[in-house]
């Protein structure tokens, strides 16, 4: 994936940014609201609903 360079359209650049945010940045970034866990690590601590 590239986040730098020239894109053919604004839509292409938006798609690249959204892919980065949803695919890497948010799942691995630590969040203070989650006790400084990443969303992926926090989800592992949750119990399944009965």
Image (tube, rainbow, N blue to C red):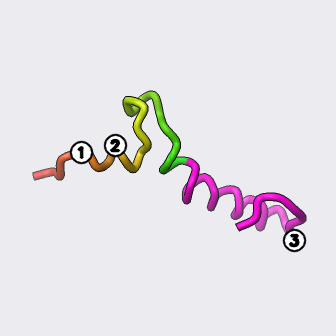
- Foreground pick, 9 / 41: 41
Query: Does 11 lie within the magenta span?
Result: yes
Q: Closer to the observer: label 3 or label 1?
A: 1
- In the image, is residue 48 above or below residue 10? above
x%, y% of residue 16?
71, 62
Decide: is 32 above or below 8.
above
Choose between 41 and 7: the one closer to the eye: 41
Q: How busy is the neighbourhood of tag 2: few (under 14 within 10 Å), some, or many (20 plus)?
A: some
Q: Position of residue 41 (x, y in %)?
A: 36, 46
Disc 2 and disc 1: Cα gap in Å? Answer: 7 Å
Q: Within 10 Å of the Cα at label 1, are there few (<14), some (14-19), or many (20+) other Cα atoms?
A: few
Give SS at disc 3.
loop
Q: Residue at x 90, y 65 (%)?
A: 6
Left-right relation of 22 to 46: right
How would you classify the magenta stretch by its main secondary structure?
helix
Q: Residue at x 52, y 42 (%)?
A: 29
Tell me how far mark 3 sits from mark 2, CA to CA.
38 Å
Q: In the rendered structure, does residue 24 fall within the stretch colored magenta?
A: yes
Please name the residue shown 24% across and 45% down the image: 46
Q: How many marks?
A: 3
Which residue is most to the left? Answer: 50
The residue at which mark 3 appears reads as 8
The residue to which callout 1 is attached is 46
Q: Nearer the viewer, residue 11 or 36?
A: 36
Residue furthest bottom in the image: 8
From the top left corner, tell me how far across and down residue 4 is, in percent.
83, 58
Disc 3 or 1, which lies upstream in sequence? Answer: 3
Quadrant position of the N terminus in the picture:
bottom right
Q: Does the CB distance between marks 2 and 1 fall below 8 Å?
A: yes
Along the horizontal axis of the image, is 10 left or right of 30? right
Residue range of the region highlighted in magenta in the rendering: 1-25
Tag 2 residue: 42
């Amino acid at each position: 994936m590239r986040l730098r360079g020239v894109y053919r359209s604004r839509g292409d650049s938006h798609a690249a940014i959204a892919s980065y945010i949803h695919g890497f940045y948010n799942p691995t970034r630590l969040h203070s609201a989650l006790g400084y866990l990443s969303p992926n690590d926090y989800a592992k601590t949750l119990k399944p609903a009965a």
